[in-house]
Amino acid sequence: MGRKRKKKIVEQVRFHGIADRGKGVGKTPEGQIVFADKAVPGDVADVLVTKKRKGYYTGRVTQFHEYSPDRVEAFCQHFQYCGGCKWQDLDYPVQVKHKEQVTRDALQRIGKVEVEAFLPILPASQTRFYRNKLEFSFSNKKWLPPEQLNTDISNEADVLGFHPAGAFDKIIDIEKCWLQPDPSNAIRNQIREIAHAQGLSFFDVRENVGFLRTMMLRVTSLNEVLLLIVFGEEDQEKRTFFLDTVAEAFPEINSLYYCINTKLNDFVMDLPMHLYRGKDHVMEQLGEVRFKIYPKSFFQTNTEQARALYDVVVDFAELQGDENVYDLYTGLGSIALYIAKDCQQVVGIEEIPDAITGAKENAILNGIENSVFYAGDVKDILTEAFAEKHGLPDLLITDPPRAGMHPDVVKMLLKLAAPRLVYVSCNPATQARDIQLLSEKYQVEKVRPVDMFPHTHHIESVALLQLKDN
């Protein structure tokens, strides 16, 4: 038998900042760097090491010696275990201060570029009930907190809520979620009661069986509601009775959809969505632009801060009305349509065909005639021939996914050499990496982080790049 490895605990770690994915970062009295969940800047704690890497440890807090003066009481009863809002126990002004520092550090450490003006982070005006979209899971296994394990309390219960971190097969039964406005909590709680009353089976992820699997709920800023129920198996009689009961209980649901998913994963964007009752979309609005939102539509999940983010883009763009603009990774065309009135033409590219269909439809809805949209991978669509067809861009806007831009896209941007480039990112690390590659021809004029997701580690960052003088 091999020897059991002795667990290592590092003591008196003084946490001073926040690192990637929201972990607290601190140092031992000897100067060893430590990353740990559940720690916030100002805490002093002992940490059980779970991973040892060259130059740093990663672990979890076992004992606090001092609590940060910036700690506050979390307002959600599920906070300790849910993990959806990791920083509820950190005062909000301190959260945004550290998010700003994370963005600065990424640009300095990864980008290694000089930023002429780093503007203060734009905080969210609303820190509760700010999301317009949430997804919940049905499960026949209730997650139990550690103090209830190995007791007479059973986890055999049909519940509806969120997965805790590290427990893919169990669900926290969410009574009240502080992320989405009314009628979100009322609809979810009533759906649970309806399902129990009708004796419907909740999903068992290990066995891949169960009638009710997941649900997606969208509540727009215009008070319209879209509900998608995902069934794990087909039973028309049960499905019809259930959906009719839900619709009658909540007449405020404008669009009621369902989907059948018998796969081994919860991804449903590749499956057909069936409209059961109501209209096939809900309406959302950003500034003067109205959007039709469907079940598969990608749209910023914080409507109010999306407008604030796009206003930063508009401010950085300094459009005069005669510019040719490219909008890469355009999604539903939200940025493109938002800035269309301020330029001569905007050309959007997005990989997801349904999103481009929505972008074209929303252009027509808003009477916007100076937009053109293409479906396809940006690295394949954006070519010299494409630029010859549509004209060289005076301004290029890019808003890639968390992984950042493909190297071929970066190379093409250097060839196009647009005088100005606005880079919107949900990941400062990959933004900094791409900016470093673009620094061959561009200098960073200004950067502004935007907090889209209070109480989480997620950060949006907007950077304005200016073509260097030859």
Image: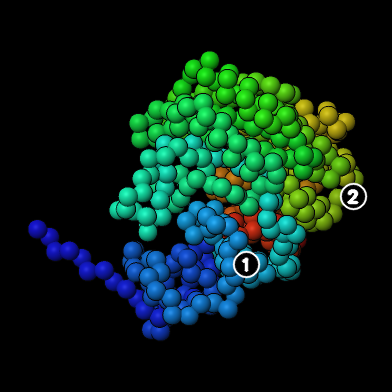
Determine which residue is flagged by label 1.
95
Does residue 167 lie above or below 440 as drawn? Answer: above
Picture coordinates of residue 195 (x, y %)? 52, 30
* Image mark for residue 285: none
Q: Residue at x 56, y 47 (%)?
A: 175
Q: Residue at x 35, y 31 (%)?
A: 207
Tell me the distance, in whole angstroms, between the alpha carbons under discs 1 and 2.
36 Å
Picture coordinates of residue 120 (x, y %)? 73, 68
- Quadrant of residue 368 in the image? top right
**Residue 393 seen from this side:** no
Which residue is at the far top?
Answer: 237
Picture coordinates of residue 41 (x, y %)? 54, 74
Q: Quadrant of the N terminus?
A: bottom left
Determine which residue is flagged by label 2.
320
Q: Quadrant of the C terminus?
A: bottom right
220 on left or right of 34: right
Q: Choose between 7 and 288: the one closer to the eye.
A: 7
Q: Helix or strand or loop: what does disc 1 sit on?
A: helix
N-terminal of the two: label 1 or label 2?
1
Q: Residue at x 56, y 45 (%)?
A: 406
176 on left or right of 170: right
